[in-house]
Image (spheres, rainbow, N blue to C red):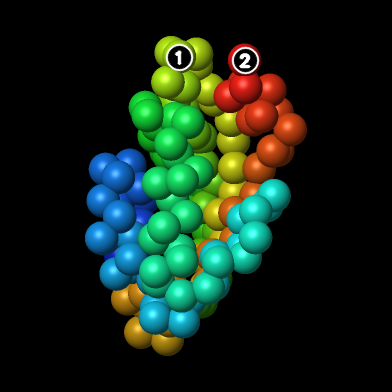
């Protein structure tokens, strides 16, 4: 079963609900994203997502496998989308969530995917 904080995260990303993204993270949360600077705190994290997804106006993260080990949740994801020019983009990724003790917020998120393969699809 997927923890509610993780479900809220994916719902917010897919809906581009950046206010909801902000609230699903703990106040001092950390986002470690391959190929990008580490973001700390709700405001930095919430500002990260619209910038990263600006080149992909159509996007969807589909969790395909969820592994829960206490407060750590690992999610395999299939990403599909389209660039602003209409080119398709698809790749697989892994997100590792560290949840707060009560499980209602995310304290740390690390995202892992092949940045070179994604860049080849996004850049003309």
The vertical placement of 102 against 65, above or below, is below
- For the N terminus, the image quarter is bottom left
The vertical placement of 109 against 91, above or below, is below
Q: Are marks 2 and 1 in contact (CB under 8 Å)?
A: yes
Residue under the point 59% across and 49% down = 94
* Residue with the most extreme right position: 116
Question: Would you name the residue on which mark 2 appears?
Answer: 124
Q: Is residue 2 visible?
A: no
Residue under the point 43% across and 50% down = 49
Residue under the point 41% across and 58% down = 47
Nearer the observer, 72 or 43: 43
Q: Position of residue 104 (x, y in %)?
A: 32, 76
Residue 7 occupies quadrant: bottom left
Secondary element at image label 1: loop
Q: Is residue 33 visible?
A: yes
Q: Is residue 58 left or right of residue 107?
A: left
Nearer the observer, 93 or 71: 93
Secondary element at image label 2: loop
Question: Would you name the residue on which mark 1 appears?
Answer: 85
């Amino acid at each position: 079963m997927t923890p509610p904080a993780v479900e809220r995260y994916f719902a917010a990303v897919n809906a581009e609900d950046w206010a909801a993204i902000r609230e699903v993270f703990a106040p001092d949360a950390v986002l470690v994203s391959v190929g990008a600077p580490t973001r700390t705190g709700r405001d930095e994290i919430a500002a990260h997502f619209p910038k990263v997804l600006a080149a992909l106006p159509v996007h969807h993260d589909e969790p395909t496998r969820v592994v829960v080990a206490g407060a750590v949740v690992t999610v395999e994801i299939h990403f599909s989308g389209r660039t602003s020019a209409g080119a398709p983009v698809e790749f697989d990724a892994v997100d590792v969530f560290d949840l707060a003790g009560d499980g209602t917020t995310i304290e740390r998120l690390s995202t892992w995917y092949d940045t070179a393969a994604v860049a080849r699809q996004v850049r003309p």
